[in-house]
Image (cartoon, rainbow, N blue to C red):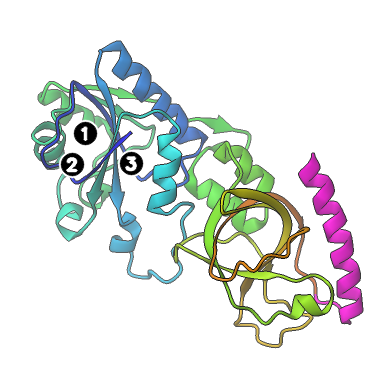
Amino acid sequence: MIIHEGYENLNIFNPVVTLGIFDGVHLGHKALIARLITTSKNVSGESVIITFYPHPQLVLSEKKTNLAFLTSLEEKISLLEKEGVDHLIIIPFDNVLRNKEACQFIEEVLVSKIGTKCLIAGFNHHFGRKGESDFETIRRCAESFEIVVEQVKALETDKGIVSSSLIREALLKGELEEANRLLGYDYFMNGTIVEGRQLGREIGYPTANIDSDYKNKLIPKDGVYAVELIIDGSKHKGMLSIGWNPTVNNDPGNRTIEVNIFDFEKDIYKSKICVVFRRRLRDEIKFKSITLLAEQLKLDKKMALRLLKE
């Protein structure tokens, strides 16, 4: 996959294009991308995905502090590369772009800059100023420039149409297995090991504290998870806690992500780590004593090992 930052000096043969945010690159996105690739091959062209950075909500929303997304730009690129797309064009989303009418964007970008021959649209594609243009508006404008337009149907499950918002909602509710099913892979987070209070070492379960590398990364619901960890290219098993550590912490404003890596004793302070969320074990609990906490951690580890083996 060739990555283009902006759309100047492109040289793409017979481009077949789709565009969107692609947060999470979930099963619905993959169905759209599969159709994009099939169509490009049928017309002997090249498949092109257009996405935007930063996430448009970070520009459009007045309240930015609580915005959380499934993937950073780097994670999104990594996932899209696996789909076999020929080109990824990353367009800066700013106040100039936000105010372009859909037909203006089609003419100035899709036609003049990219030379689009075919546009593959998702089931709910809206773009242009304030997202006011629906599919029919987009289709009429594109066809006036002799662009063939096709709309891909929504991918539906028993919980509704597969969407990034549905997956975000599942993760925040603690429905990890449902989120992973809709993603088509296990949710993951890239981060850095940072210094913690090392309280886990005192009860026989040393933990490494993790800071997400993406400040707007969606962190799943508080609780304990069975996880797979990738450190320096090696895979390890562990259990991870998200929350406030209520048994030993009196500061409710100090939410942490801590992982106990099984059979691991290396110093990995400041190392990069990828956390893959396999299964959710339980909610966060405030125990009456450290002894009871240690007994529960023993049970958590046993359960995590069994689930990760499965």
Amino acid tagged 1: Thr
Q: Which mark is residue 20?
A: 3
Residue at x 65%, y 83% (from the top left corner): 252
Q: Is residue 239 above or below residue 159?
A: below
Q: Is residue 118 above or below residue 308?
A: above
Work out whether residue 122 or residue 140 is closer to the camera in this orientation and state it. 122
State which tag comes first along the sequence, 3 or 2.
3
Taking the image as shown, residue 142 lies to the left or right of residue 125, namely: left
Residue at x 85%, y 53% (from the top left corner): 303
Work out whether residue 235 or residue 6 is closer to the camera in this orientation and state it. 235
Residue ID for mark 1: 137
Q: For the N terminus, give its image quadrant.
A: top left
User: Quadrant of residue 16 in the image?
Assistant: top left
Amino acid tagged 3: Gly
Taking the image as shown, residue 276 lies to the left or right of residue 280, namely: left
| CA gap, disc 3 and disc 2 | 13 Å
